[in-house]
């Protein structure tokens, strides 16, 4: 009863294949967007931005990217951290080499460069599958981190080995550097998240997405209906890396401001994003958001309850967090491999009839 | 059969045209095992061609040769009067050859509609950028493909399940969805690998009707492997019989039924009753 689709008829195929076929969903989507763009910027504080909103938005982009590769195209990747590093360092080199060009363009270009790198590392996927591909992408992760540590050209020969985002402005407002207001960095990330989610949704509901899913579900049958596996897998790597690169660029330039590659983009980051899509839901754009929100909020909520409310020591709470994440991963892999997104779908199906049993 | 080079009209009024697919002296080996030994036969435009034989006779291997999964060590495949170079399966598909599998090969994670829409992938020309913004050519193509797919859905009477995930469907319907996916590609030649395996009588009747209708209404040439002799004899215009990788019979159902080699190898059991 809370959730209605009765009387919501479609008279064209365009209307039937839209992103939110149910009117109720569509209105809710516009309300969420309106609140995010028009209300939140007025109430945002440095704490909420840095602890919750910015990491949520940036990890959402990374999770969308990985979900395209792993959830839609079925190619397991453990190289997300490395590809985020490619985005970050590409953005840094572009920012310092072309200071006059708008930062937003740099971020998009960084995504493009990451797409090229990701495609190159995707080449082994034509020969190897599953576990073995995961190990190959793991090699990419370690190689890329080593590369950005070793070759000082990437960090402009700075003594610390770090990269620091210089101040850049959009429409006269600083969006990178120490003087950035919280609402500005929030809005930049929000714009990218919205655009990325829209593009990802359009690609996955269309012909390209069907190619990816066909390869994921049964590659032999996909080939027999005319899917070129080489092209399908490489486009998945390219699109996925594009999004991951954008998230890496934003993570460095807008969120952290200063980055040391092993610390910010290590193997932990790869696993974090992988956990996000497992908990959120493989093969679902909403799942990427749900997983990112969950894993970003979890430490904050645990700290609120454990440290502030119950007075436990901080390190105990931090360890608890690892335990909880581990348990949750096991729970979702066993009980609900399609994650929070599937739980949400089931809840909606139940709500269609609620409070009646049939 | 060599004298039948002219096109002719069957008893039920269908026109059988020129040779569409010509297999010449195909030999396929897996290591020391010869799965197919020097087999030649052709498939003519508009006909229903059955390939029969006991288990392990090499029937499925033959289909896999036609659809490009196996590359024969010897022999040539001629398609539409031209010798076909070595091709990958997806290139064969683009030439207009679609098929179904003995064990259903559907995309379990996708809905029935999406599964059938994959059959239209070859007809999608819009680029990645157009698809990303879902405007112009991409949206137009999507709608055109959807219209075509809906015609197939109507034809096979599966309207009610179009939004159902394939994993939830019963066996018989899965077989039908797989046929729908192959049909959505508008194939010139349709290969069916045991389309009626594991079905009950009613489902077999439905499937037979669909096969005849596909052939009749769309003019699709069909090659099928089937074990149900009643179905094969009723449906097909010509039958190839294989045993241990060799061709032991080729001709109309009546020819084959009276061929002593075939009776000995295969139909002998059926003739006893």
Image: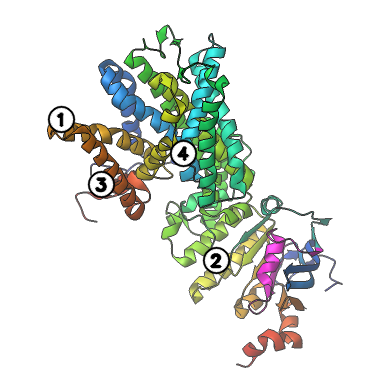
The answer as to whether the residues below labels 4 and 3 share one chain is yes
Residue A60, given in percent of the width and then of the height, sits at 39, 32
- Image marks 1 and 2: residues in contact by CB distance under 8 Å: no
The magenta-colored residue range is B46-75
Mark 3 surroundings: few (<14), some (14-19) or many (≥20) residues within 10 A: some
Query: Per the image, is B72 magenta?
Result: yes
On-image quarter of the C terminus of chain A: bottom left
Residue name at image x 56 percent, y 45 percent: A211
Q: CA distance from mark 1 to mark 2?
A: 59 Å
Which of the two marks, 1 or 2, is nearer to us in this view?
1
Residue B272 lies, with reference to residue B41, above or below; the image says: below
Label 2: state its secondary structure: loop
Where residue A84 appears, x then y in whole percent? 48, 30
Q: Is residue B98 visible?
A: yes
Q: Which mark is residue A351?
A: 3
Q: Say above or below: B78 vs A62.
A: below
User: Nearer the observer, disc 1 or disc 3?
Assistant: 1
Q: Are marks 1 and 4 in contact (CB under 8 Å)?
A: no
Secondary structure under tag 4 reads: helix
Q: Are marks 3 and 2 on the same chain?
A: no
> Dot 1 corresponds to which residue?
A308
How many angstroms separate mark 1 from mark 4 (CA)?
Answer: 35 Å
- Which residue, given by chain and number where applicable, does mark 2 sit on? B103
Q: Nearer the viewer, mark 1 or mark 4?
A: 1
């Amino acid at each position: 009863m809370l959730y209605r689709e009765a009387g919501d008829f479609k008279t064209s195929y365009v209307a039937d294949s839209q992103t939110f076929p149910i009117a109720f969903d569509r209105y809710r989507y516009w309300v969420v967007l309106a609140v995010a763009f028009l209300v939140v910027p007025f109430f945002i504080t440095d704490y909420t931005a840095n602890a919750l909103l910015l990491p949520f938005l940036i990890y959402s982009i990374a999770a969308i990217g990985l979900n395209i590769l792993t959830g839609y195209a079925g190619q397991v990747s453990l190289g997300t951290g490395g590809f985020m590093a490619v985005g970050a360092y590409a953005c840094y080199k572009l920012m310092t080499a072309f200071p006059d060009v708008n930062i937003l363009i740099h971020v998009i270009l960084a995504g493009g460069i990451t797409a090229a790198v990701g495609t190159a590392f995707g080449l082994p996927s034509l020969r190897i599958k599953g576990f073995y591909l995961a190990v190959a992408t793991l090699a990419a992760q370690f190689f890329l981190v080593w590369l950005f540590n070793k070759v000082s050209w990437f960090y402009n020969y700075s003594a610390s080995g770090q990269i620091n985002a210089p101040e850049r402005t959009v429409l006269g407002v600083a969006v990178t550097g120490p003087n950035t207001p919280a609402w500005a960095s929030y809005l930049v990330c929000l714009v990218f998240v919205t655009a990325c989610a829209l593009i990802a949704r359009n690609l996955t509901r269309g012909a390209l997405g069907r190619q990816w899913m066909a390869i994921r579900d049964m590659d032999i049958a996909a080939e027999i209906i005319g899917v070129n596996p080489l092209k399908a897998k490489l486009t998945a790597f390219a699109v996925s890396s594009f999004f991951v690169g954008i998230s890496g660029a934003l993570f460095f330039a807008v969120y952290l401001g200063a980055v040391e590659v092993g610390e910010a983009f290590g193997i932990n980051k790869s696993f974090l994003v992988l956990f996000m899509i497992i908990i959120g839901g493989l093969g679902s754009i909403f799942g990427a958001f749900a997983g990112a929100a969950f894993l970003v909020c979890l430490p904050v909520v645990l700290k609120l309850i454990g440290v502030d409310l119950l007075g436990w020591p901080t390190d105990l709470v931090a360890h608890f967090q690892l335990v909880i994440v581990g348990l949750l991963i096991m729970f979702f892999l066993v009980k609900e491999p399609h994650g929070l997104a599937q739980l949400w779908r089931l809840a909606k199906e139940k709500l269609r009839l609620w409070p009646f049993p049939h | 059969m060599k004298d039948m080079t002219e096109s002719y009209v069957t008893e039920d009024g269908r026109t059988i045209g020129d040779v569409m697919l010509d297999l010449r002296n195909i030999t396929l080996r897996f290591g020391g095992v010869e799965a197919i030994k020097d087999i030649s036969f052709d498939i003519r435009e508009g006909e229903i061609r059955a390939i029969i034989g006991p288990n392990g006779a090499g029937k499925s291997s033959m289909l896999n040769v036609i659809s490009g999964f196996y590359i024969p060590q010897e022999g040539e495949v001629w398609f539409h009067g031209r010798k076909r170079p070595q091709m990958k399966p997806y290139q064969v598909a683009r030439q207009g050859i679609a098929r179904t599998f003995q064990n259903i090969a559907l995309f379990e994670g996708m809905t029935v509609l999406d599964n059938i829409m994959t059959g239209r992938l070859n007809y999608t020309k819009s680029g990645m950028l157009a698809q990303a913004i879902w405007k112009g050519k991409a949206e137009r193509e999507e709608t055109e493909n959807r219209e075509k797919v809906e015609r197939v859905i109507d034809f096979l009477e599966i309207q009610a399940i179009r939004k159902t995930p394939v994993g939830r469907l019963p066996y018989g319907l899965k077989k039908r969805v797989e046929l729908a996916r192959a049909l959505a590609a508008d194939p010139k030649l349709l290969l069916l690998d045991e389309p009626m395996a594991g079905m009950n009588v009613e489902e077999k009747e439905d499937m037979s009707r669909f096969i005849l209708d596909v052939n009749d209404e769309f003019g699709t040439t069909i090659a099928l492997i089937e074990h149900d002799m009643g179905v094969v004899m009723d449906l097909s215009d010509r039958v190839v019989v294989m045993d241990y990788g060799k061709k032991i019979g080729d001709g109309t159902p009546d020819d084959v039924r009276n061929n002593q080699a075939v009776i000995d190898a295969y139909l002998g059991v059926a003739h006893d009753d």
